[in-house]
Image: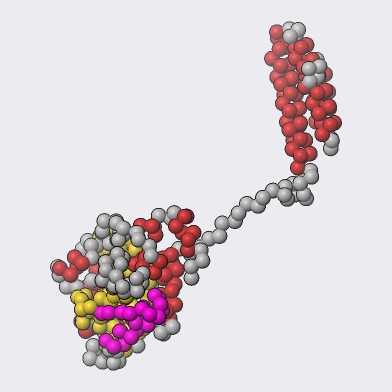
Amino acid sequence: MLDNIKSLQAEVEKFSTTSLQELDEFRIRMLGKKGAVTLLFGDFKLVPPEQKKDLGQAINVLKNTIQDKIKTLLSELKHKDEGPSGLDLSAPGEPVLLGSRHPVSLIRNQIIDIFKRLGFNVSKGPEIEDDWHVFSALNFPPEHPARDMQDTFFIEQDPDILLRTHTSSVQVRVMENEKPPIRTISPGRVFRNEAISARSHCIFHQVEGLYIDRNVSFADLKQTLLFFAKEMYGQDTKIRLRPSYFPFTEPSAEMDVSCTLCNGKGCNVCKYTGWLEILGCGMVDPNVLESVGIDSQEFTGFAFGMGIERIGLLKYGIKDIRLLFENDMRFLEQFQNAL
Ligand code: DAH
């Protein structure tokens, strides 16, 4: 019986066909009601108990080999007509998803592009900063309440190491390393210990701007920002500057643009004022210039800072900042054709 199994095993291994009909005949010959394997199982009943284990195993191996063989041959025969590499050339294609830039990157690139045209270069600084670059050099005295304007994530204390709360820290680094004239913008990520809501997040992005030279005036600041607002939101955009306070600028202002949705007529986005606040700015405080070794008698400058998310929310009419960080494809896909 074992010889019989062995010769069947060899026959199966040799077997090959290109015809479905032959394959079916093979199946019946082996596994059919009167097939070789079925007969073996019949004979197996008569085998003395001590041989049952070995023979039983051998028959099962044979049966599995046959089944595998039939499966392989069947799939080869099925795919034979489907083109050179076994692909079904008539099957519908699988869609290739097109990637798109994240809206925060889109807006950051637009901002960089606008200021580059005015001769600003791009500078970068670290996200983990020390107290000097984030606060002290920017004229925040120790214990001064102005530090509470920005809730800070501290990493270490004495000396303080922290996550930067604004990209104004980069202007300090640039002024420490370069001599005027300086004309730079610094895009980057910032961190604030704030509750996450539709309007604010604890991680977001800012672009800082800095221009230091002889005779830089508030008029230069205003004209630069007007150019930016028109390029970003359209040529009909108007701006207004409201007096404000920042430790590192004097005088300081906040800038509004005419509402991008209602063009200043009044709607629920601008709370019926016709205006939207988009950035803070001012003339660099002489104390800041002196703290980085720039002669404030000889040089003056302006600075400004804006949140990239906020600029984007207003540009694209997005109502909730959290959408920018959820990575929901249904949201992100809508920016495929955006500039
Ligand atoms: N750093 C300020 C903030 O995060 C924004 C800012 C305001 C930057 C006025 C400036 C500026 O350079 O002049 O709220």
Way the structure is coloured: secondary structure
Residue at horizontal 29 percent and vertical 56 percent from the top? 196
Numbered range of the magenta stretch: 218-241
Residue 143 sits in quarter: bottom left
Look at the image and say whether residue 224 sits in the magenta stretch.
yes
Residue at horizontal 74 percent and vertical 23 percent from the top? 63
The residue lying toward the viewer, choosing from 225 and 184, is 225
Vertical arrangement, residue 206 with respect to residue 178, above or below: above
Relative placement, left or right, of 311 versus 82 is left
Vertical arrangement, residue 288 with respect to residue 36, above or below: below
Using the rendered image of the protein, determine whether residue 260 is visible from the camera's viewpoint: yes
Residue at horizontal 75 percent and vertical 49 percent from the top? 85
Give the percent coordinates (x, y) of residue 109: 44, 72
The residue lying toward the viewer, choosing from 152 and 119, is 119
User: The N terminus appears in which quarter of the rendering?
Assistant: top right
Vertical arrangement, residue 214 with respect to residue 79, above or below: below
Magenta stretch: dominant SS?
helix
Using the rendered image of the protein, determine whether residue 169 is visible from the camera's viewpoint: no
Look at the image and say whether residue 76 sits in the magenta stretch.
no
The residue lying toward the viewer, choosing from 238 and 15, is 238
Relative placement, left or right, of 191 versus 45 is left
Residue 194 sits in quarter: bottom left
Vertical arrangement, residue 239 with respect to residue 41, above or below: below
Give the percent coordinates (x, y) of residue 16: 83, 34
Residue 206 sits in quarter: bottom left
